[in-house]
Amino acid sequence: MASFSIRAARPEDCPDLLRLIKELAKYEDMEDKVVLTEKELLEDGFGEHPFYHCLVAEVPKEQWSPEEHCIVGFAMYYFTYDPWIGKLLYLEDFYVMAEYRGLGIGSEILKNLSQVAVKCRCSSMHFLVAEWNEPSIRFYKRRGASDLSTEEGWRLFKIDKEYLLKMATEE
């Protein structure tokens, strides 16, 4: 049985965070979409007004990966506000390295996130899951998650930077 600890990310974890973000992107067949740098992660998460918070899963030296990684999972989140129900914890990314899955790390990260949400008086936790990612869908549903796309019919949209700039400069 693996021993591990869950803790808040620290500035020196940024290289590992970026590595895990890229691993997740590769798992989702989207690794070419990652343009974020360690410097941006550091500035955006550990500055005076952080844009995100992060938990990491760490294993002791005797359980490090063959590449000598001790940070084996992460959850990146932030707080947002819904005018109908109030404060929300938004889980942006959540990943555990493949060789460390099934050891309870993901469940413990989710438990810690739930504790953060309750402590901050959030009404719920929101997140996205790719339609094809059945293992994750099952993981969340076993823990009481509702699929809003089927239950409430919501669709996710985005406006890329190009169009943001265009709208921002319209007269």
Image (cartoon, rainbow, N blue to C red):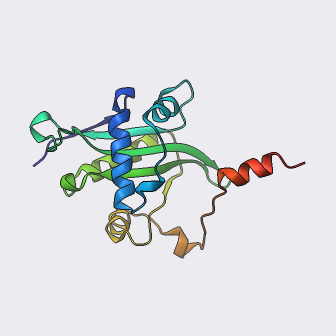
Up the image or down, 136 lies above or below 42; here it is below
Residue 75 screen position, x and y as percent = 38, 46
Q: Which of 75/30 is in front?
A: 30
Residue lying at the far front of the rendered structure: 32
Residue 20 screen position, x and y as percent = 33, 46
Up the image or down, 149 lies above or below 82; here it is below
Residue drawn at 43 percent across, 41 percent down: 116
Q: What is the tally of numbered marks visible in this picture?
A: 0
Q: Which of 159/131 is in front?
A: 159
Residue 91 screen position, x and y as percent = 46, 50
Residue drawn at 77 percent across, 51 percent down: 166
Q: Which of 166/108 is in front?
A: 166
- 160 lies left or right of 170: left
Residue drawn at 46 percent across, 49 percent down: 34
Residue 10 screen position, x and y as percent = 37, 29
Tell me, yes or no, if residue 103 can be seen here: no
Tell me, yes or no, if residue 11 can be seen here: yes
Residue lying at the far right of the rendered structure: 171
- 76 lies left or right of 109: right
- 34 lies left or right of 73: right
Residue lying at the far top of the rendered structure: 48
Residue drawn at 60 percent across, 64 percent down: 156
